[in-house]
């Protein structure tokens, strides 16, 4: 993930793992299979984390904040070419990622928005489906090298600004007050 998909060979992966290429091919049929399995592990891990956050019964802002911290920790070192490589060379992996965004991320955002409205932390005058859709579609924009070249912007900073913008746009006055206190608590 830190070098891009296309630039890393199966020889590189086997060497990094300290196994022979023959051993690697006992577990995966080819590079695309490896990418698909890696994405599945990543998606399962994120789903598990989201479920853990839901079980903690955090308010909508705290849940949003914790999940965003987890996302930053996981993807702050992703090379910008990863999304390009998936688009161009691994369409099955890209579709899997798109399906995940639609089935998991969109649903989580929608649930979080609805709960935040009920808690009075989010504005009650928003169209939840539109905001959830904007959140999901904006994920791809964060990797756009035209607007956010990795030589100028760390992904972590781009994501954090996007998250702040999202939260400030959906928060009620009560939610903004709570959010500001939360940011002081974490020195952000």
Image (cartoon, grey):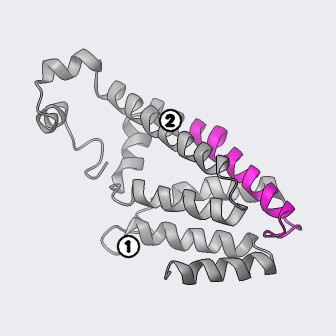
Query: Does residue 43 appear to the left or right of 84 in the view shown?
Result: right
Gap between marks 1 and 2 measured at Cα: 29 Å
Residue under label 2, please give it.
44
Crowd around label 2: few <14 · some 14–19 · many ≥20 (10 Å): few
Name the spot of residue 154 as percent of width and height, x first: 37, 70
Query: What secondary structure is marked by label 1?
Result: loop
Q: Is residue 31 above or below residue 180?
A: above
Q: Which residues are magenta?
A: 99-126
Q: Residue furthest top?
A: 26
Name the spot of residue 3 as percent of width and height, x first: 25, 51
Question: In which quadrant of the rendered view does residue 114 lie?
Answer: bottom right
Query: Does residue 75 appear to the left or right of 56 in the view shown?
Result: left
Q: Is residue 60 above or below residue 8?
A: below
In magenta stretch: residue 101: yes
- Front-most of residues 151 and 109: 109
- Front-most of residues 128 and 138: 128
Crowd around label 1: few <14 · some 14–19 · many ≥20 (10 Å): few
Mark number, residue 112: none
Q: Nearer the viewer, mark 1 or mark 2?
A: 2
Name the spot of residue 35 as percent of width and height, x first: 36, 33
Residue at the spot 34% in from the left edge and 52% down from the top edge: 81
Residue under label 1, please give it.
153
- Magenta-highlighted stretch: main secondary structure? helix
Q: Is residue 117 above or below residue 151?
A: above
Residue at the spot 41% in from the left edge and 41% down from the top edge: 86
Residue at the spot 44% in from the left edge and 39% down from the top edge: 42
Residue at the spot 75% in from the left edge and 75% down from the top edge: 175
Query: What secondary structure is marked by label 2?
Result: helix
- Front-most of residues 184 and 15: 184
In magenta stretch: residue 45: no
């Amino acid at each position: 993930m830190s070098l891009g998909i296309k630039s890393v060979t199966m020889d590189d992966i086997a060497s990094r793992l300290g196994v022979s290429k023959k051993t690697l091919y006992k577990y995966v049929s080819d590079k695309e299979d490896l990418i698909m399995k890696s994405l599945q592990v990543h998606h399962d891990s994120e789903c598990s984390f989201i479920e853990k956050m839901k079980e903690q019964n955090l308010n909508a802002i705290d849940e949003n904040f914790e999940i965003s911290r987890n996302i930053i920790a996981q993807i702050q070192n992703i090379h910008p070419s990863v999304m390009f490589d998936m688009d161009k060379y691994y369409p099955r992996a890209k579709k899997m990622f798109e399906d995940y965004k639609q089935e998991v991320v969109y649903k989580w955002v929608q649930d979080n928005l609805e709960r935040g409205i009920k808690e009075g932390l989010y504005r009650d005058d928003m169209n939840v489906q539109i905001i959830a859709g904007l959140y999901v579609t904006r994920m791809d924009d964060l990797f756009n090298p035209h607007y956010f070249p990795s030589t100028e912007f760390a992904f972590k900073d781009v994501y954090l600004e996007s998250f702040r913008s999202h939260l400030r746009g959906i928060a009620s006055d009560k939610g903004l007050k709570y959010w500001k206190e939360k940011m002081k608590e974490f020195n952000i």
